[in-house]
Image (cartoon, rainbow, N blue to C red):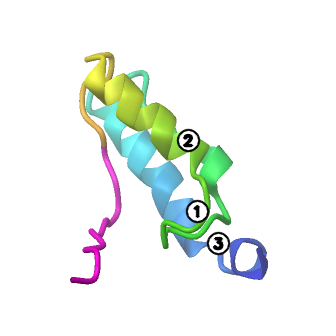
Amino acid sequence: MSQVLGNLESHKRQYQMAETAREAAFAAAQVIEEDFGRSGSGQMPKPGFQRLVAEVCAGSVEIPCYIETSLQKDAA
């Protein structure tokens, strides 16, 4: 949580990306705020991401935009 409160660069970048998408005619662009401060390690639930995946699968999202992503492989 301290990183979320102290390091606002990622937060600002996400909002700027949403604004850029709106300027490019994607009027419904939004930032998934409920996952701020949650680890991407897979150990913590991310309800915003889960909602996004469901909306993408339902075809109700034009284009998901993200700053970075990574895939965790299970240890063999």
- Left or right of 50? Residue 2 is right
Residue 46, horizontal then vertical, whole percent: 57, 51
Residue 15, horizontal then vertical, whole percent: 52, 50
**Which of the marked residues, 1 or 2, is nearer the chain's N terminus?**
1
Element at badge 1? helix
Q: What residue type is labelled 2?
A: Gly
What span is in magenta? Answer: 65-76
Q: Are marks 1 and 3 in contact (CB under 8 Å)?
A: yes
Q: Looking at the rendered structure, which numbered label has been put on residue 48?
A: 2
**Above or below, comparing residue 46 to residue 12 in the picture:** above
Residue position marked by numbered label 1 in the rendering:
11
User: How crowded is the residue under tag 1: few (<14 C-alpha within 10 Å), some, or many (20+)?
Assistant: some
Q: Which of marks 1 and 2 is in front?
A: 2
Residue at 26%, 32% in the rendered image: 24
User: How crowded is the residue under tag 3: few (<14 C-alpha within 10 Å), some, or many (20+)?
Assistant: few
Residue nearest the observer in this picture, 49 or 43? 43
